Image: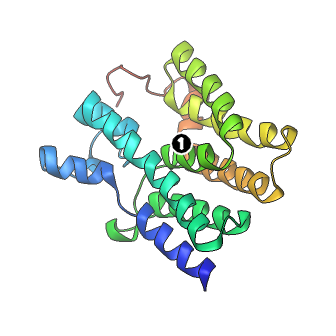
């Protein structure tokens, strides 16, 4: 019952789409019909500007942090329940029940989850991610690098098996959600941060 309750609360928390809400509140639009069509921080930045984009990024990260703490409080720190809560909050973000199961790609929420569960691996992977984005201006590439590095770092830093398995699952989540971005990266058609969106 504890695990089910944590999972449900975390999923519902994840299903709160701050990107969608920002679009409605600030411009009266469905952000999923503008820019890249993604309900996430990067598209919010492109469509609504820096302030809303940064705000959505932080709120989406906080969803991940809050979900892990929900799992912690319900279980007394059981890594399996923490991981379950982390998976569910990201699933909620990606497939939100409140918004027709059309959400974002889950990277900001993944960062929140992993910073809470595995701070040092997330920090080191985050630094490489930021460097990759700074060098290429491809946010998607940085996101893919971040999720690819996490399992490696978590394995070598000897974190609990449950967290390692979570990092592998989130790697799969991220790469599947970014499959169109991967295709564009390979063909040189991916949109760069700060550039006008290509048709």
197 lies left or right of 68: left
Residue hosting label 1: 180
Q: Nearer the viewer, residue 88 or 114?
A: 114
Residue sitting farthest toward the top: 135
Q: Quadrant of the N terminus?
A: bottom right
Tell me residue 132's x, y (percent): 60, 20
Residue at point 66%, 50% (across, down): 117
Q: Quadrant of residue 81?
A: bottom right
**In this rendering, does residue 32 appear at all?**
no
State whether residue 172 is above or below residue 44. Answer: below
Specify few, some or many for label 1: CA neighbours under 10 Å numbering under 14, 14-19, or 20 or more.
few
Q: Quadrant of residue 122?
A: top right
Q: Quadrant of the C terminus?
A: top left
Residue at point 12%, 50% (across, down): 28
Residue at point 62%, 53% (across, down): 173
144 lies left or right of 149: left
**In this rendering, does residue 50 appear at all?**
yes
Tell me residue 95's x, y (percent): 46, 63
Residue at point 34%, 43% (across, down): 56
């Amino acid at each position: 019952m504890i695990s089910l309750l944590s999972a449900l609360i975390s999923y519902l928390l994840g299903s709160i789409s701050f990107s969608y809400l920002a679009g409605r509140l600030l411009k009266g639009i469905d952000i999923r019909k503008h820019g890249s069509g993604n309900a996430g921080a990067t598209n919010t930045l492109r469509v609504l500007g820096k302030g809303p984009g940064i705000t959505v990024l932080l709120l989406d990260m906080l969803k991940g942090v809050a979900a892990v703490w929900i799992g912690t409080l319900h279980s007394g720190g059981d890594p399996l329940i923490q991981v379950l809560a982390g998976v569910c909050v990201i699933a909620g973000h990606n497939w939100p029940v409140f918004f027709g199961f059309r959400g974002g790609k889950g990277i900001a929420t993944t960062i929140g989850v992993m910073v809470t569960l595995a701070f040092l691996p997330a920090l080191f992977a985050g630094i490489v991610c930021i460097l990759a984005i700074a060098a290429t201006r491809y946010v998607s590439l940085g996101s893919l690098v971040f999720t690819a590095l996490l399992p490696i770092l978590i394995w070598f830093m000897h974190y609990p098996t449950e967290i390692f398995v979570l990092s592998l699952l989130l790697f799969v989540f991220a790469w599947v959600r970014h499959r169109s971005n991967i295709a564009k990266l390979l063909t040189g058609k991916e949109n760069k941060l700060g550039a006008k969106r290509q048709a």
